[in-house]
Image (cartoon, coloured by chain):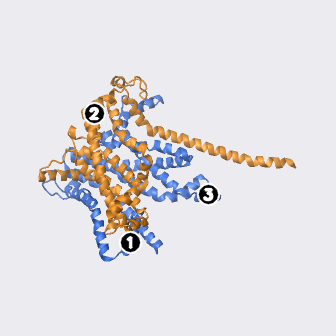
Amino acid sequence: MAQAAAIGGALEERGASRGGGLARRRARIAFLLCLPLILLVLALVIYPAFYSLHLATLNKSMTRFVGLANFAFLFKRETFWMVVEQSVIFAVGAVVFKALIGFVLAHLVHRLPQRGQRAWRGMLLVPWVIPPAMSTLVWWWMYEPSYSALNWLLAGMGFAPVPWLGDPYWARFAVILVNVWYGAPFFMIMYLAALKSVPAELYESAEIDGANAWQKLIYVTLPMLRNIIAITVLFSLIVTFANFDIVRILTAGGPRDMTHVFATWAFKLGIESNDIPLGACVSLFMFPILGIAAVFILRDVHRRSRELAGVAA
Amino acid sequence: MSRPEVAAPGAEKAPTGDLRRQRRWALWSAYACLGLFCVFFLAPPIYALVTSLKTSQEIAALEGNPWLVRDPTLANYAALLGSSTFLRFFWNSAKVAVIVVAVTMVIATLAAFSLARMRFFGSTALATGVFLTYLIPETLLFIPLFQIFTWLRDVTGIEFINRWWILCIVYPTLTVPFCTWILIGYFSSIPKELDEAAIVDGASTLQLLLKVFLPVALPGLIAATIFAFTVSWAQFLYPLAFTTSLDQLVLPVGIVTNLIKGDVFNWGQIMAGALLTAAPPVLLYAFLMDYYIAGLTAGATKG
């Protein structure tokens, strides 16, 4: 987002220095270069997004306008409220653990001697590289109740076998665990990059002032990383809220629809049960969180471009 | 009198030795923690590898340590690589990935060049808008897109749903915004003196892009290419919603829907298939890790 502001500033300065006719010709070329991107976004992102608003107001056979009847129908269904609850539990639970584990890992790797860091980072990022649909298949096999790798380990430690995907509450835990496994490395990489950009002098002066490790974390690291933490958590919240692959493959929403999130339920209603308007309705519930994110990001861009203008003046 | 003088250096030495011991202890505990996390992160791929080397009999026997393989066999891999359906999935995935990467890089490079260096009405808003577009998840768009393609079929008579190439149309919505975004970053970091020098030497806009920007921003181009490839190779929702026939499926969906037939789980083959599907992005990552990470951290991304 800082980029956009910087680019904006750079563009302004450039535009002012050009003459009229040449500037217009350049603007036309610039617009033409962006045209494929604009068309793609308009036709395949913006238009479908608004089209789904329209779809959500039709009846099942899409022949009649029914207003908000689909929403009214959803609000009366118990499954809908369960999906809302599970989506929030899934997204918030997974993001909190991903952020925590990512933060701890970034610190651990950052503390290692420089030459060892590469190898560790390389190994720790593997879950992020494997296509999530494929790693979820592997987790499914590890969760297998009769002869599962996990239950075998538990038995070895003297615990009773766990019905990972058979019991609704364990299943909720199981889908979150897979998401944490997949997403934590990403947080680690982001925080590690941010940690490396914190000036060492800050820690040195904190040390001179007698700060211990904990105080350095609270008063130096966290304030310096505040922005990157906020942004990664916000983005991750959006993506995790919209997650599809993991729940679809592990449980397909079951047992008793208790692990459905918005995306999988929308898929079930819209594509599998052929009720496109109702599916569109469900997927629209992912909009609010997107809107909130957009407000934050736009505010950030705005603030940074103002800061930039201040520096220039 | 001399005693305290002797004792003093010793007293000074003790805390430094202590500190060093403390440091070493902290380092070892960091290694131990990281080791535990590595076990957690690498257990699934390792377990997949172990299972893929087992015979169906060994898996069905349900006895002994599941993490060990008693008589390893490559039969699962041989069965997959000899099956025309699996090869068909692989071929479809490869076609889609190559086309999507090419389309993405052309659209993203042109737009990023324009947004990083030129100005037109609304260009600043567009740069921000591109980033916001990137945040719109595919789970929000697959239902309206499905309906749009059904409608297009009714109008044009061309079948869109259940054709592999429909993925080449929809995947760029996932790849182009982010690739444009990282390329804007790389292009803006090129010093302006460089293009001014090229323009003074009589370079056209096109020459400026091809002869100056692309070579200088090569690391950015590689990072964007890797990102586009990884996304189109791993995408699961769109192919699941838009393709159903055996000969139109791509790898992830093909493996999930086709290797699992009813109640019969041929786990050995499923795991071999999952590993073969994961192989191209993992290999790419192994050889180009730095570009991969540069792309990831370039513009605070999704996770």
Foreground label between 1 and 3: 1
Callout 2: helix, strand or loop? strand
Q: Which chain is orange?
A: B
What's the colour of chain A in the image?
Answer: blue
Is residue B103 at least partly visible in the picture?
Answer: yes
Task: Give neighbour class at mark 2: few <14, some 14-19, many 20+ (Cα, 10 Å).
Answer: some
Residue extending farthest bottom: A20
Relative to B260, does residue B187 appear above or below in the rendering? below
Estimate the x, y position of residue A222 in percent, counting from the top left: 52, 57
Q: Residues within 10 Å of mark 3 (few under 14, many from 20)?
A: few
Q: Nearer the viewer, residue A5 or B3?
A: A5
Q: Decide if residue A64 is on the left or right side of residue A183.
A: left
Q: What residue is shown at x 27% (from left), y 64% (from top)?
A: A32
How many angstroms separate mark 3 from mark 2 (CA)?
A: 58 Å
**Residue A99, image x and y in percent?**
45, 50
Mark 3 = which residue?
A204
Closest to the camera, between mark 3 and mark 2, is: 3
State which chain disc 1 sits on: A
Q: Residue at x 57, y 42 (%)?
A: B29
Instruction: Indicate the amino acid at tag 3.
Output: Glu
Determine the chain carrying the residue at label 3: A
Q: Are marks 3 and 2 on the same chain?
A: no
